[in-house]
Image (cartoon, rainbow, N blue to C red):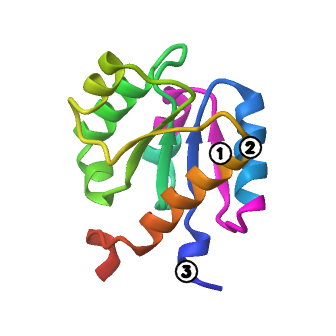
Amino acid sequence: MDPLDRMPIVHIEHDVDDHYLVEKALQAASIRNPVRFFRNGQQALQYLQTTDEVPLVILCDVIMPGMDGFELRDRIAADPVLHMKAIPFVYFSTWANKKLVEQAYEGPIQGYHLKGISFEDLKAELSLIVAYWRRCLHPRSFQ
């Protein structure tokens, strides 16, 4: 098994239906990485601060109850241990507007992607994101 297949994908989204669709789209795209689902930023941050796993990528919704995606991004960037793990942080949302995208790029992120309107759009977008981060070098590529 490819070591990259063992790196989890972290999906942070308050809508459980979206969790289900993302899981099914990843399976349909033959992406074998385990997926760690969290319903809010606080749960995800706690996991990231306590796990030995280093995720392949974080897919985070923008607007969520409690800690939203912007605050989560800022908290990860401010944590020296998480910062050095160089986990790609990608906003993955149902919608966007100029203000949200500008706010997203005020901090360290690696992209803002829309889920699309169909299951095929969702599968294609996830395939693109995962393929990119499987090929991209980051500091932990040399460990």
Q: Which mark is residue 119?
A: 2
Residue wearing tag 1: 122
Identify the disc placed on residue 68: none
> Which amino acid type is marked by label 3?
Pro
Identify the residue at horizontal 49%, vertical 19% (top origin). Answer: 63
Mark-to-mark CA distance, 1 and 2: 5 Å
Q: Are marks 1 and 2 in contact (CB under 8 Å)?
A: yes
The magenta stretch spans which residues?
A: 28-46
Residue 143 at x, y = what percent? Answer: 32, 81
Q: Quadrant of residue 122?
A: top right
The tag earlier along the polypeptide, 3 or 2, is 3
Q: In the image, which is nearer the foreground, mark 1 or mark 3? A: 1
Spatial separation of the CA atoms under disc 3 and disc 2: 28 Å
Q: CA distance from mark 1 to mark 3?
A: 25 Å
- Classify mark 1: helix, strand or loop: helix
In the rendered structure, the answer to whether residue 72 lies left or right of residue 77 reads right
Nearest to the observer: residue 11 or residue 85? 11
Q: Residue at x 60, y 30 (%)?
A: 13
Q: Quadrant of the N terminus?
A: bottom right
In-image side of 101 versus 95 (left or right): left
| Image quadrant assignment for residue 37 | top right
Crowdedness near tag 1: few (<14), some (14–19) or many (≥20) residues, C-alpha within 10 Å:
many
Residue 3 badge: 3
* Viewer-nearest residue: 13 or 102: 102
Relative to 75, 94 lies left or right: right
Give the mark nearest the N terminus, 1 or 3: 3
- Position in image of residue 4 (x %, y %): 53, 75
Above/below status of 25 relative to 127: above
